[in-house]
Amino acid sequence: LTSAPSPSALMAFIPFADPRDAAQMRALTQSTQDYAAWVDSTSVRLCDVFDHFPSLSACTSTTAGQRDQAEGGEAAAPCATPSLGRDEQSGGLPVEVFLQMAPASRQRFYSIASTPKVTPGEVHICVSRLTYKINSGVVRQGICSTFLSMCQPGNKIRFSLRAATEFRMPHDPEAPLLLIAAGTGIAPFRSFWQHRTSMKRACTHVGPCTLVFGFRHPGPQGELFSEEIRAAILEGAISEYIPAVSRPKPPLAKAYVQDKLRENHVKVRDILGFGERGGRPGHVYVCGDVYMGEAALYEVEQAIGSENWAKMQSEGRVHKDVYGEHKKPAVATKFVQSEKHTT
């Protein structure tokens, strides 16, 4: 219900609207440019069509924004929730038509942040609770992340597991690793250092591992798993830790993961086996937002050269777990709070 109403949905709703609303919906379906502008400027959701086209509701006293105010904790008008189910007296959009045009809820994929070697029978995930403000000033929340943040111990959650065949530790435990993450992108690398810690304790020799981790603010709300990272360093599961803080306290300068990689081109070459002394071929892993991932891997390519970069890709030594789209959402501001949840 939180996805934008498709042009086909608007077409299906036209017969149940009054002439004015029907004309507006028809105009939107006939112009791709006007439709895109409407969606981008209003951040409209399928459940908002009753605000934009009041005649679709059997209760037509609902005004635009009342339902969003209710979501934000403010008092809702008596008819903040529209009525469905057309009849001769009230009119309105039939519930079966509305639900037929509602797309199925999409799956949310989260990287596993644990290993069964340490927590058998458990799967840990690291979730960012999303809160954002649209152009009108209304504050909205992410559905799945908000739901997870509200879960309490003992609650049941339906989920499925999917193997990430291209994003796992190399078969050679002595292969050098360069791990790059920002925000909750640290999740899969938690499973890495947990696994490497268990291997160290079993007297298995592991290769060097460098972690480059970007976060906004110092402290536990920004630097996720900071105590675990430092414990992994003491255990030898992480050889070197390079933090990148983008909102540091003065007088420190802000830095992103790509900045840290740029400052350490020589080290990157050494880790991946392209330094002056050669060495065992290394693997690079990146997890996080697609913009961060592209910027980080660009710096890795700059460090080792295009030919070596192509060689790494052909040998399967470049591993990406990135999310998000290149098109930025039509929001004015966005605040993200990170929390840990275990299922």
Image (tube, rainbow, N blue to C red):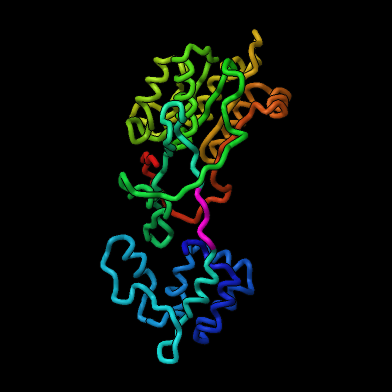
> Whole-percent x and y of residue 57?
42, 80
| Residue sitting at x 46%, y 30% | 116
- Residue stretch in magenta: 104-108
| Residue sitting at x 44%, y 91% | 88
Relative height, residue 340 to residue 142 (above, below) = above
> Whole-percent x and y of residue 191?
47, 29
Place residue 183 in its image quadrant.
top left
Relative height, residue 304 to residue 59 (above, below) = above
Between 238 and 289, the one nearer to me in the picture? 238
> Whole-percent x and y of residue 318?
63, 29
Q: Would you say 61 lies left or right of 15 here?
A: left
Between 15 and 191, the one nearer to me in the picture? 191
- Report if residue 257 lies within the magenta region: no
Can residue 294 be seen in this snapshot? no
Residue ranking furthest to the front: 121
Which secondary structure is most common in the magenta stretch?
Answer: loop
Residue ranking furthest to the left: 75
Q: Would you say 142 lies left or right of 267 here?
A: left
Place residue 91 in its image quadrant.
bottom left
